[in-house]
Image (cartoon, coloured by chain):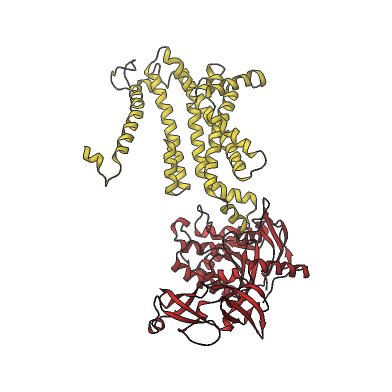
Chain colours: A yellow, B red
Amino acid sequence: MIAWVRNPWGRPRWLAVVTAAYVLWSIVPVGIAILFAFNAGRSRTTWQGFSFHWFTGSTGSVLHDPALQSALEHTLLLAGLCVAISTPIGVALGLGLQRWRGPGGGTVNTLMLLPLVTPEIVMGVALLLLFLRVFPGIGLGTPAQVIGQVTFTLSYVVVMVRGRLASIGREYEEAAADLGAPPHDQLLRVLLPLLAPAIIASAAVAFALSLDDFVVTQYLSSDASTTTVPMLLYASARGAPTPALNAIATVALVITLATLTLAFLVYRRFAGGREAVELASLEV
Amino acid sequence: MQGEIRLEELTKQFAGVVAVDAIDLQMPPGEFFTLLGPSGCGKTTTLRMIAGFERPTSGRILLDGGDVAQVPPHRRNVNTVFQSYALFPHLDVAGNVAFGLKYRRVTKAEQRKMVVEVLERVQLGGFEHRKPAQLSGGQQQRVALARALVLTPRVLLLDEPLGALDARLRKDLQVELKALQVDIGVTFVFVTHDQEEALTMSDRIAVMRSGRVEQVASPREMYDEPATEFVADFLGVSNLLPAEAAGRDGDCCVLRLGESTLLAARGATGSRGPVKAMIRPERIGIEPHGSAGENRLPGLVERVVFLGGSSELHVRVVGGSVLKATVVSGDGEAAGLSRGAAVSLHLPREALRVLVPDSAQEAESAAAAAERPVRTAPSM
């Protein structure tokens, strides 16, 4: 064992050991949670046999409990709207900040990064006050939740698009212009295809962030119809938890993973193999 | 014939720093014109202004007589081969080459035919469906060339296109590129910092330095008759000896180097005061120690550098300067030339050139500029 770790010709084994330990540490709890989604009994701690009861059973399952179903639907609705709004705006902002720098660019730049470092609870409270006092017309509920989620997912999209843009360099746009492409064609025929991997990746990240969000979504919710999966999990964990919660969490996890896998596959079609690896590292 | 470029008082400043300083250049149609100079001399900025990527601070860019200085790049009939090639990685070779054809009135079928033809021309037939990442550096360079040539530009701009290639391939492509240029007769404006490349390929060269044009001439003229110390030093190997000019004696200038007196028949022979005497290594004759005659300098061989077909002798002469002299291989050994040998260097008067030092040169050209308000670059 010692010799295996110390082998000076091989790769640094202790890095492998640390990595393996971390992966195990982070996956095991998730694995256990998923496992109990398939528990036959009502316990979330004692294994009572395998069953799909909490997914498809006739009582209390994800499929048949109206509260769980509504939460899942609302979560997906918010995520879909959040991606549909924050991705195009984020790409436009990223392009503007990176390519057409003007006066005030530096300030805007800093402001864009602010949501990334602001504690989410602060943002949640601020947004709550905003919708209660400043825009009472919008009020709380789905529109407020979407706007709230877009507010912080936008920053991620901008940062990812700008990172990619910085590595693209100006010569592609110049080459397009040189070959006769007017500005909108430089954007459509060259810049956007080159940005496609970043756009897909940032859309996937925005989706995952929205799916996962608790604080902002909770603050801006109105009634039971605006409850999302994370909110439901939080609320019922203290009440009478059943493995149905594990089941719905599993469903949410599968949706997230499926989204990221899809994004990865689309990305690989657009970009070369080397860049696909970049995204793969992003998914973690 | 189209493709004439004239630059008039062209100036570019970046945040107050002058990158290109009121240059005047003329490139007739079909010429292979090279902008040569060290990095930061303004050659690339000049090229980018002709392409339209930079807007001149002042001055005019005349393309076949029309001023294009304020025309955006996509409306100029000039094309560029970039140093990095800038091939679109998401498009295959055919897609890259056909990119600009979309803006020409040609049918899809014609486009395909043109793409095939131009790829044959750059010897890349059959590579239509490769992605740029699957090509070697030399092949990418050819695609970049094909992508520009398919649009039959009036002028092709090349920004150090061979810079990223290895030495061997670069030599081959130099010859190929020159042959292609002669074949299609398009004006080439070529930017490089490689003096050998410039000498091999160009019809004419403009040597630039800190935003100004030092000299415009054919490669041979530039090599044989450098106008300034800078040009002499930048193109090829030069010996530059500090000397004191003591006026004209017949056709020659009398130069004093310490105890010795030399006669120089070329350059600014009417000068007086501190000057540089310039001579190319291959023009220096090596004679046995003590040889008599004019323009002989005694010296000691310090080093013999073997270069294959020739050797370079470093000889320390009176006054402490080291002169480089070229000896064809075989001759040197026969003469017993080795480290420490005492020799006499013959600097023929018709190979010795008087160059006014830079500061004096600038004062002189400023005075000349004041006399002639409209400056035009010398053309052939």
Query: Quick check: can you spot residue B184?
Result: yes
Quadrant for residue B27, please give it.
Answer: bottom right
Say if A103 sits above or below B232 in the image.
above
Query: Quick check: can you spot residue A66?
Result: no
* Nearer-the-camera pick, A234 or B259: B259
For the C terminus of chain B, the image quarter is: bottom right
Residue A145 pos. (x, y %)? 57, 24
* Nearer-the-camera pick, B321 or B54: B321
* Nearer-the-camera pick, B258 or B211: B258
Residue B185 pos. (x, y %)? 61, 73
Quadrant for residue A48, please give it.
Answer: top left
Extreme residue toward the front, this view: B259
Question: At x 29% / y 40%, what residue is drawn?
Answer: A13
Residue A34 lies left or right of residue B7; in this view the side is left
Residue A169 pos. (x, y %)? 55, 50
**Picture mark count:** 0
For the N terminus of chain B, the image quarter is: bottom right
Say if A87 sits above or below B220 in the image.
above
Quadrant for residue B61, please give it.
Answer: bottom right
Residue B198 pos. (x, y %)? 55, 70
Say if A170 sits above or below B43 in the image.
above
